[in-house]
Image (cartoon, rainbow, N blue to C red):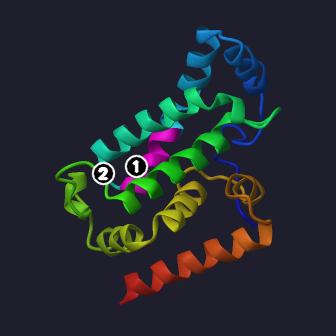
Amino acid sequence: MHDNSNAHYSWTEPGRDPELALAAQRGDLGALFTLLRKYRRELWRVCFALTLDRQRAERLVHDTLLRAAKNLRSLPTGSSMLPWLVRLAAHLATAAAKNGTQAPGAEPFSPEALGTGLTEMERPVLEAFAALPEGERLLLALDTIEHISYPELAVIAKREVPVIMNQVALIRARIAREEAA
């Protein structure tokens, strides 16, 4: 069973999001800024997991928030904003990678780039995480770092819960094998 006890709130619970989204769609800039600011921290962590680079993550957050503001009308009625923002960020990151529009001078990820004192046990795990495709990194980050429940992951990824559970298990097993090698 997946432990969701560390989550402060449900990512998929709409709360005031629909009310603020409706106000923002009607031109209330205060509502728009409240809505976008509300999830900035979570969005940054997701963008960092996707890019593995602080500058690219900041750029992706910026681009995601701009795109969200322009396309707020496409937020499904009654939905939470955060899963929509995460899917938008993942789409923009994938498009940037395919189009070669990464930040100039962006280098491949290395654990040393984080500037932390990694142990010899942490280094192979982080390298294995970095080697994952963006979609798998995102899924694992949402599961492991954000402590998102499987049902919420299914909503965010638009997949069935058993599929998400299987995919996360396979990703974890692959990282464990690479770390052991």
With respect to residue 151, does 58 lie above or below? Answer: above
The dominant secondary structure in magenta is helix
Q: Secondary structure at mark 1?
A: helix
For the residues bearing labels 2 and 1, Cβ distance under 8 angstroms: yes
Nearer-the-camera pick, 4 or 51: 51
The residue singled out by tag 1 in the image is 48
The residue at the far left in this view is 105
**What is the residue that sits farthest to the front in this orientation?**
99
Give the image location of residue 78, x and y in percent: 83, 32
In the image, residue 20 lies at what x, y percent? 71, 19
The image position of residue 107, as x and y in percent, is 20, 59
| Residue type beneath disc 1 | Phe
| Position of the N terminus by quadrant | bottom right
Residue 116 in sight from this viewpoint: no
State the mark number for residue 139: none
Q: What residue lies at 67% left-to-right and 16% top-to-bottom?
A: 24
Q: State which region is magenta.
A: 43-51
Cα distance, mark 2 to mark 1? 6 Å
- Quick check: 125 left or right of 72? left
Residue type, label 2: Asp
The residue under the point 44% across, 72% down is: 132
In this picture, residue 152 sits left or right of residue 120:
right
Between 90 and 126, which is closer to the camera in this rendering?
Answer: 90
- In terms of depth relative to the viewer, which is nearer, 48 or 73? 73
Q: Mark number for residue 53?
A: 2
Asked if the magenta segment contains residue 44, the reply would be: yes
* Residue 50 in sight here: yes
Few, some or many residues within 10 Å of mark 1 (<14, 14–19, 20+)? many
The quadrant of the picture occupied by the C terminus is bottom left
